[in-house]
Amino acid sequence: MHLIENTNYYVDQIKMCVSTNDNIMGEASPEAKTMFLNNEFPDEVIEGPPENLDTPQPDNKEQLIRFFN
């Protein structure tokens, strides 16, 4: 349910990133370049939007299945 509830937030973030050329002349840091070249993302928790604190969780598997139907 968490992923379903917050998908719009992440899609909006993607839309913002691809809708502007504000940073087109910028360059990734050497660390970022290495990370992307090696496909090695850091093993750390990435915080989502503050609304995550209020994201309801399913009580059981059946409730989650009903959410999709």
Image (cartoon, rainbow, N blue to C red):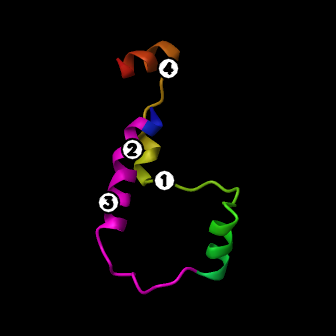
Image label count: 4
Secondary structure of the residue carrying numbered label 3: helix
Q: Which residue is mark 4?
A: 59
20 within the magenta span: yes
Residue that numbered label 3 is attached to: 15
- Residue type beneath disc 3: Lys
Disc 1 from disc 4: Cα separation: 22 Å
Q: Amino acid at mark 4?
A: Asp
**Residue count near mark 2 (Cα–Cα under 10 Å), binned few <14, some 14–19, many ≥20:** few
Q: Residue at x 39, y 81 (%)?
A: 23
Kindly check if marks 3 and 4 are in contact, taking CB atoms under 8 A apart as contact.
no
Residues in magenta? 4-28
Residue drawn at (34%, 66%), measured in percent from left and top? 18
> For the view shown, which residue lies furthest in the left direction?
19
Q: Earlier in the sequence, mark 1 or mark 4?
A: 1
How crowded pointer 3 is (Cα within 10 Å; few <14, some 14-19, many 20+) is rated as few
- In the rendered structure, which disc, 1 or 3, sits on the residue that comes first in sequence? 3
- The type of residue carrying mark 2 is Thr
Residue at position x 33%, y 46% from top?
8
| Left or right for 16, reference 25 | left
Q: Would you place residue 39 above or below residue 9 in this image? A: below
User: Dividing the image into 4 quarters, which one contains the N terminus?
Assistant: top left
User: Could you say where residue 26 lies in the image, as x and y percent from the top left?
Assistant: 46, 85
Tell me the CA gap for discs 3 and 2. Answer: 12 Å
Q: Residue furthest top?
A: 62
- Per the image, label 4 sits on a secondary structure element best described as loop
Of residues 56 and 26, the one drawn nearer to the viewer in this rendering: 26
The location of residue 28, given as percent across then percent down, is 55, 79
- Residue bearing mark 2: 7
**Amino acid, disc 1:** Gly
